[in-house]
Amino acid sequence: MAKYQFFQLSKDGKKLVRYLCTDREDFLPAKELLLGQGFEVIGDMIYASNDQEAIDHFNSGMIYPLAEYNKAEGVGGLFYFVKGIYEEARDFYRRRANSSHQNKPNL
């Protein structure tokens, strides 16, 4: 999972937001360029599978850190564990049902 860092610049009453993936080779030069233009680092690093997921986590505000905290706690971790098992089972049976419908010959 990649790490993303977000930057913000307040200009003319508007807030410009940019992000960088820390796994890219040009991360440090790009970060220096943004900081040189007046951008500031905002928030913590966000772990995500892709750019869109990182943006969604960023836009969620405090929901993402709260969810991560709950996953680390015993009861919250148990909830997400059971939820994950349910979702995997549901997806498995959906794939299985779809493949059985596709394999039936049309008469």
Image (cartoon, rainbow, N blue to C red):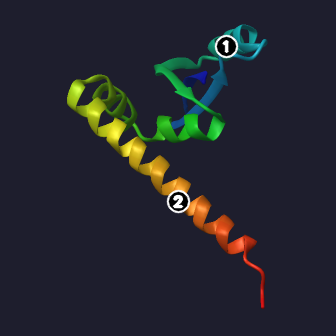
Q: Residue at x 62, y 41 (%)?
A: 52
**Quarter of the image with the C terminus in it:** bottom right
Q: Could you tell me if residue 94 is visible in this image? A: yes
Say whether residue 80 is left or right of residue 88.
left
Kind of residue at badge 1: Lys
Say whether residue 74 is left or right of residue 58.
left
Residue 13 vertical placement versus 8 (above, below): below
Tell me which corner region of the image, top left, top right, bottom left or bottom right, holds residue 73: top left
Say whether residue 19 is left or right of residue 41.
right
Kindly report which numbered mark, 2 or 1, lies closer to the viewer in this rendering. 2
Q: Residue at x 34, y 34 (%)?
A: 67
Kind of residue at badge 2: Tyr
Residue 97 vertical placement versus 34 (above, below): below
**Crowding near pointer 1: few (<14 within 10 Å), some, many (20+)?**
many
- Return the residue at label 2: 93
In depth, the one of 59 and 106 nearer the eye is 106
Residue 106 position within the rendered picture, expressed as x and y whole percent measured from the top left: 78, 86
- Return the residue at label 1: 31
The reply to whether the C-beta atoms of the residues labelled 2 and 1 are less than 8 Å apart is: no
Mark 2 residue element: helix
Say whether disc 2 or disc 1 marks the residue closer to the N-terminus.
1
